[in-house]
Amino acid sequence: MAISSSVVFIFTSLLFLSGYVLQQQTVRSLQAVIKPQPVAPPPPSPVLAKHFGTPPGHSFYDKYLASNRPKGGWAKVAYVQLVREHLHVCNALMLFAVLEEHESMAQRVIMYPKEWDQKVDGQSPVDPHIDTSKRLLREAATRYRVMLQPVEPMLKLVGGESIFPLVGLLSLSAYNRLVYLPPSGLVLDTSGLDHLFTLPMETNMLGISAGSEDESNTPSVVLLSPSKEAFQTSLESLPSKGYDEDRFQSKISLLADLPEDQVHVVAKTSSLRHQDDAFDAADFSDTTSYVHISDAGMLGPEYDSSREAIASARPRKLQPKKAWHDMYEKYRQSRMDVCGLDLEPAPRSGVDNLGAQDQQTVI
């Protein structure tokens, strides 16, 4: 009898406890339903990317960029490439590919010889490089939103050579400011270059030199303020013969000092020879916007230079040498990825014939 009573007591206690647990769960569920839900906090304000990737028209960005926007807005400024040789079409395409990747809001223009579009007696052009150049120009227009502008030569030399002087860029009077990057070079980051559109200019052409003091004063970046008057004045001052583009560029007024936050906007590979032991290759790549690739004794980054030429041109110190090799290798890889072109074989006659042979190997 005592055992039966104990069994009944145990089962009664378990039944009571299970009922109590279910009751508490039901009460908590009802409280959760009846209790008002907390209001979710508003989403954080958008963060402006350093490359100014969002186009004008958004109030947040308009306010943020009020002090940094170029005169007339981003529709009135442009990166422009004056392509005179087939060899440099790929370089222009590479520059605009980076501008598109970094979402630069400036406009993009390629000026090229109009004769490239012409046919002889209804037949295809004889120049074997025309097809490659046209392919790259079409890709620039369709993929990277580049405006293509064929131009007539401004000068004709006695031997029939067509001349396209840099002053021809001043004819683009629809823009308030142009940035021209002489070939060949690499755009590593567009934020510093975009700031060049906001720099004050007292002349129609202003250069930025990245070379060392013992090098020529040929600019690595040229800023232009186009106008019909400036173009006409420059056109009238052109010599009828003996025009030399390098000599002309060496006479362009150079910007004395960049703002403190833009000292790493442009660099030149030839200047790496003069860097000391404190130089850091990784920091150079991370903080430089544009690298002008030009070295004495080197044909250019488009060519497969000899070991002797490379050994003579590259810096001696470890870190500057690493940065130098990185720039040439990055250019080679970008040329392959963007244009589908391998390096050009070096002309047999050497540097003196640079430009005489500009064959392009299609991959």
Image (tube, grey):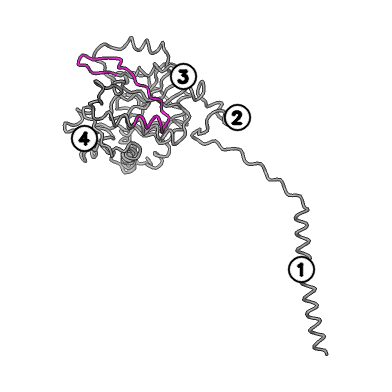
Please say if 325 is above or below 299: below
Nearer the observer, 169 or 182: 169
Q: Which residue is mark 4?
A: 346
Q: CA distance from mark 1 to mark 4?
A: 87 Å
Of badges 1 and 4, the one in the foreground is 1
Q: Which residue is mark 1?
A: 21
Q: Which residues are magenta?
A: 136-163
Q: CA distance from mark 2 to mark 4?
A: 53 Å
- For label 4, the SS is loop
Q: CA distance from mark 1 to mark 3?
A: 77 Å
Q: Which residue is mark 2?
A: 59
- Sequence order check, earlier mark of 1 and 4: 1
- For label 2, the SS is helix
Q: Which residue is mark 3?
A: 176
- Sequence order check, earlier mark of 2 and 4: 2
Callout 4 amino acid: Ala
Tell me if residue 155 is in the magenta stretch: yes
